[in-house]
Image (cartoon, helix red, strand yellow):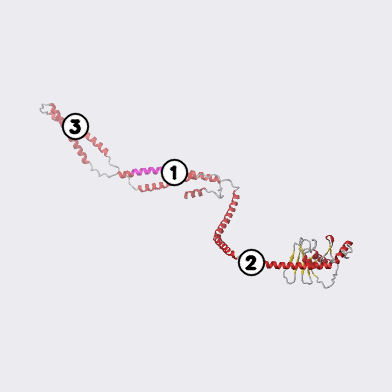
Amino acid sequence: MILKDFLAHAETEIELGPGMTVLTGPNNSGKSSVVEALRCIATNPLPKPFIRHGAKKARVELEMDDGVRVAWVRKKATAWYEVLRPGEEEWEVYAKFGRNTPEDILNILRLNQVPLEGGKSLDVHIGNQRNPIFLLDQPSSVAAQFFASSSEASHLLAMQTELKSRVRAAKREKKFQQQKMDEISAELDGLQAMPDVNLELEAARELKGLMEKFESEIPVVESYLKRKSELEKHKTDLGARGKELVYLQEVPELFPDAPLDRLVAGLENLRDHGQKLKLRSDSLSGLEIAPELFPVQRLEADLARQNQLSFAEGQQSARRKVLEQLTSPPQIEDLSALSTTISNVDRGCVLRDNILHRAEVLTSLVEPPELHDFSPLMQVMNSLSSMRKAQADAQDRLSELEKSEVELKQQIENRLAEIGNCPLCGGDLDAQKMIGESHES
């Protein structure tokens, strides 16, 4: 008899001899616990504090004369039996059997109680320590029932034993036949599956094709999963940033940069055009100024005045000669012929004087130089003047644009100073840096 964590016994092993075994010892040494252990393994009583303090379960184990070992295990809320037969290595467990002790356990222990009328029973093997005298503390009716049942006890026990042996034999036979039927059924099932081999092979081929397809798609799925994890992480980051940006104010309306871009582009075009005009002006600065042409109109006016003076002087000299002839006038019969002659003489003198004077004047003149074709030069000069005018206009326009650029930069600096920091990234807004980047781009 072995007791483990049962009441006062931590681990006690008692070897019972043949005949009577007497346990002696002082009080509270565990003698009554041995009797109570036999009662527990025989009757499986209601849960009571059988478990030793500090342990989780109590165990009562008996080894019978035939080598069978029976154990009763008690936990706080449940109990079960374990049986180890000779030649076996594993314990057979009896659990979930209700309140009554299993029949197999009672047959091994042979500590059955005697049933009485009215559903009661009487324990004839284990006595109560407080009522040591058997049947003397019971009513006479209980004693009569006991003696009435004991007269036929041997015959009933024999019949009960025979019935139980037959039942056990029938159960073993049934179990053997059931195992044999299961083996035959398994063999038949294996033979019946032969016609379905082709179907199973076809299904296997389909599964293999699906497996190959899945193997080819696994990298894609893995990439999708990786991308999903990255997106989820990015989503988490964006969510965190969104929570941080909830408290920010709305972005102020930015200055419309389209007019500024157009203005900057126009300014760049004017600068390029001004540089081109400056290059053309530098290339034309080496040309000399055109020489002043001879004043032909003034010369013609002087010749006209000289002709008039010569004509007047010729008339006066002709008149003097006529007057000299008249001092010794000839005999003229016809005055009209004389006047005609005088007038012809006057005209001849005037014409002669004019020719002589013009010859004298022309002899003092130098031959005129051969004139050059100045039409291309005049075109260049006209183009140069127009270009100088366009350059002046462009310079004025450039000055206006530079003035507008300075005002616009000042406005941008003032606006950025009002804003302070970038509403998106929180960085400082440097006007010079932003204008410089815009100009370079």
Residue type highlighted by circle 2: Leu
| First of labels 2, 3 by sequence position | 2
SS at circle 3: helix
Where residue 377 appears, as percent x and y from the top left, is 31, 45
Q: Is residue 382 magenta?
A: yes
**Residue that badge 1 annotates:** 399
Asked which quadrant contains residue 158, the reply is bottom right
Where disc 2 sits, the SS reads helix
Question: Which residue matches tag 2?
Answer: 188
Q: Position of residue 272 (x, y in %)?
A: 41, 47
Q: Which residue is disc 3 drawn over?
A: 315
Tell us which disc is closer to us: 1 or 2. Answer: 2
- Front: mark 1 or 3: 1
Residue 159: x, y in percent?
80, 67
Identify residue type, mark 3: Gln
Q: Is residue 386 left or right of residue 6?
A: left
Side of 302 relative to 158 (left or right):
left
**Which stretch is magenta?**
381-397
Q: Residues within 10 Å of mark 3 (few under 14, many from 20)?
A: some
Pointer 1 or 3: first along the chain: 3
Residue type pointed to by label 1:
Ser
Query: Percent position (x, y) of residue 275?
Result: 40, 48
Q: Earlier in the sequence, mark 1 or mark 2?
A: 2
